[in-house]
Image (spheres, rainbow, N blue to C red):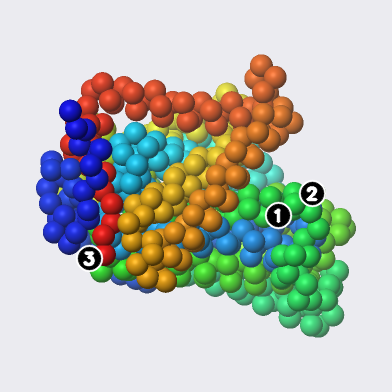
Amino acid sequence: MTHPSDNPAPITEASRAIDGAAGGLSKKGLSAGSVGLIGAIVIGISCIAPAYTLTAALGPTVSEVGVQVPAIILVGFIPMLLVAFGYRELNRRMPDSGTSFTWATRAFGPWVGWLAGWGLVAATILVLSNLAGIAVDFLFLLISQIAGNPEIADIAANPFVNVVTCLLFMLGATWISYRDMQTTQKLQYWLVGFQVAVLVIFSVAALVEVANGNAFDATAIELSWFNPFAVESFSAFAAGLSLSIFIFWGWDVTLTMNEETRGSEKTPGRAATITVVTIVVLYLLIAVSLIAFAGVGTGEFGLGNPDIQDNVFFHLAGPILGPLAVLVSLAVLTSSASSLQSTFVSPARTLLAMGHYGALPEKFAKVSPRFFTPGYATIVSAIVASVFYAVMRFVSENVLWDTITALGMMICFYYGITAFACVWFFRAVWFRSVRNVFFTLLFPLVGGVILAVLFFTTLIDSMDPDYGSGSSVAGLGLVFVLGMVVLLSGVVIMLWQWRKRPAFFRGETLSRAVAED
């Protein structure tokens, strides 16, 4: 007997709109045409959260590579751009809110597709709790700066106050995400605009201080900072690739909105590419200006000082901006809060697609009749993230932060699967044109291989008990154990859904396919 997924059906213009019961793509009731190119880019930048991300990543990276941080940013940018090209090509042929889940299912079948969807959902839901926790920390830090009372910042360490405030942040983000996409866009225009403006002002002010001879440790800017080949060791390159996972992750949110975007076949892909390029330019500006101002030494404000590396912007804001330093803390708070809200977009729409195609209970396929958003999936995402944070905050902060560290593996996992899905889906048209050779074969293949190597490297390294927080279980690093728990939990849930909903796993609701010109 022939299995439905054993004979891939070619994708044509007509097959894009066929009913889901026939094994093809279908609409899900979302608000079509509600997001434009600029809106998608703004939401993409918000999800990446550049202010929050770089203030935590810049210091540790300086410790590894010194002044070569700009080169490392460029190295880390490469796999993200290559994978983004693969996402763009898949979206051109199959604009669907399920993105990684849908595309991997079309290319490799339901089992691989389900796991790709799980990787995306697990990573984004877990990081939601981290973003909410960061927002809490910076809220009390900001209040302490305004009040001139450092003790107020310590209130965030109280677990009861911390969790209650975190849940309030989560509630607000859920309410906005539940509403229509226009509400999300309007809010993000303000939050992202303020965040980016402060970062640019911060960077320019640092360069002005250097030019005026007022820098803490003025360091002459050189072209060698941008040369990846000047990085001295392979471990530094590995650090750069790991950095890319952390500082660039989130651009794919522009693709999960594809059914709600004007020009769904082209706009989301363009938005993803522009978002990644915009972020790398912003990161380079910030890195160069702060290295030029503070140097890479271990002095009071040196970027190599371990005492300031958990929040570089906060410590340098005073010396650079003086009385306006509070703007930097407000920008980081804005960054984490806006990212908390925009990050809801990805898991909610992936869960919606999984419910729509029968890979999860039908409740996940429910769309709000008033706002045309995945209401049920949004609420479930919020509840899971809130419960996870509350429990882990009381049980152990080490477990909480090591789970966030383990997310790097999950991101490599689903990004990598999606890149390989692009390569395999387009296998029949690789050599139909020079463009196809690069954008459907070479670029996504190289990007996927880099992510696969990074996934397995992290997997092996995280077995060491000293990895992450230094906690261990049965002699294995806690990061490794948590990563395996998240992945294996997905396998268990998948097998359960296979028993409950066999139609999807037989390829009846979403079948394999291969691209044609």
- Residue at image position (82%, 66%) is 295
Which residue is identified by label 2?
Answer: 307
| Residue type, mark 2 in image | Asp
Q: Nearer the viewer, mark 2 or mark 1?
A: 1
Dot 2 falls on a residue whose secondary structure is loop
Q: Quadrant of the N terminus?
A: top left
Give the Cα separation between the discs numbered 1 and 3: 41 Å
Q: Nearer the viewer, residue 163 or 298?
A: 298
Give the percent coordinates (x, y) of residue 428: 32, 57
Which residue is identified by label 3?
Answer: 33
The quarter of the picture where residue 360 lies is: top left
Which residue is identified by label 1?
Answer: 237
Q: Nearer the viewer, residue 88 or 2?
A: 2
Mark with earlier residue (3, 2): 3
| Residue type, mark 3 in image | Gly
Give the Cα separation between the discs numbered 2 and 1: 25 Å
Give the Cα separation between the discs numbered 3 and 2: 48 Å
Q: Nearer the viewer, mark 3 or mark 2?
A: 3
User: Horizontally, is 403 left or right of 60 in the view?
Assistant: left
Dot 3 falls on a residue whose secondary structure is loop
- Residue at image position (79%, 82%) is 211
Dot 1 falls on a residue whose secondary structure is helix
Give the percent coordinates (x, y) of residue 215: 82, 73
| Residue type, mark 1 in image | Phe
| Label 1 crowd bin: few (<14), some (14–19), many (20+), radius 10 Å | many
Res. 202 in view: no
| Label 3 crowd bin: few (<14), some (14–19), many (20+), radius 10 Å | some
